[in-house]
């Protein structure tokens, strides 16, 4: 599978995306920070969230520790979310993370890479996510699965607002000053990047779950 991913065609990124970072305004090439490869985790943290998605947070707990190793192997790993930078910075301090995290607030980056959607798309069920067209329409009468409702509550928002953001991961290459999009994955395609599950799969009882059981790492003692 790794070889097949590497054989996918590189698609030139024509649009000049802009981000806000700890170091100020940045372009997509700037996010490479001198490396030739960039991995972006599309972290679910919308402008109207009170806190980052708890599920994305458990994934970020895993990659926060090894991002430094990738950075010393010509691969920059960063997160991008639509929330304003100040919100991202505050949450990053709370979680104690050190990986680069950029805000795409007000830009097209998230919609273009199929991880953010409008209220109209959601209402009409015209969302295209995880390489599938369509999607379930959602309005005030729609039934909300319990795990979605719980994750939305943990993010401090309602289910409709919460699900207008989606998780994903995209890979880019920088060659001769040109940025290429080489790969994206979404939904269960992120499973292998979710570090804690790789360990649980090797435990005597495996994942051993019937529902959402995880919390942010600073919330377990508050239960």
Image (cartoon, rainbow, N blue to C red):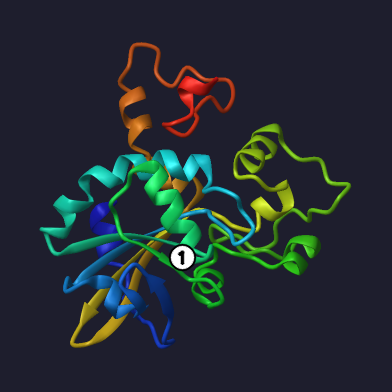
* Disc 1 secondary structure class: helix
Image coords of residue 208 (percent x, y): 47, 17
Say if 154 sits above or below 210 in the image: below
At 54% from the left and 57% from the top, the residue drawn is 130
Q: Quadrant of the C terminus?
A: top right
Q: Nearer the viewer, residue 98 or 117?
A: 98
Q: Nearer the viewer, residue 223 or 147?
A: 223
Q: Quadrant of residue 166?
A: bottom right
Left or right: where does residue 204 sit relative to residue 157?
left
Q: Quadrant of residue 181?
A: bottom left
Q: Residue furthest top?
A: 204
Image coords of residue 190 (percent x, y): 42, 47
At 35% from the left and 31% from the top, the residue drawn is 196
Say if 177 sits above or below 76 in the image: below
Left or right: where does residue 16 sit relative to residue 147?
left
At 40% from the left and 12% from the top, the residue drawn is 205
């Amino acid at each position: 599978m790794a070889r097949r991913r590497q054989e996918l065609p590189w698609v030139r990124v024509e649009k000049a995306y802009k981000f806000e970072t700890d170091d100020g305004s940045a372009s997509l090439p700037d996010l490479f920070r001198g490396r030739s490869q960039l991995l972006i985790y599309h972290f679910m943290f919308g402008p109207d969230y009170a806190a980052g998605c708890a599920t994305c947070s458990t994934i970020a707990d895993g990659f926060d520790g090894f991002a430094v190793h990738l950075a010393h192997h010509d691969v920059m790993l960063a997160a991008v979310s639509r929330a304003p930078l100040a919100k991202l910075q505050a949450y990053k301090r709370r979680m104690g993370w050190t990986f680069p995290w950029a805000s795409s607030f007000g830009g097209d980056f998230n919609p273009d890479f199929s991880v953010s959607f409008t209220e109209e798309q959601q209402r009409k069920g015209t969302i295209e996510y995880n390489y599938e067209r369509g999607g379930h329409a959602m309005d005030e009468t729609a039934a909300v699965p319990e795990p979605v409702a719980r994750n939305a509550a943990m993010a401090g928002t309602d289910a409709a607002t919460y699900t207008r953001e989606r998780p994903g991961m995209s890979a880019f290459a920088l060659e001769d000053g040109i940025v290429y999009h080489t790969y994206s994955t979404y939904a269960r395609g992120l499973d292998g990047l979710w570090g804690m599950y790789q360990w649980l799969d090797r435990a005597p009882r495996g994942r051993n779950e019937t529902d959402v059981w995880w919390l942010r790492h600073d919330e377990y003692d508050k239960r």
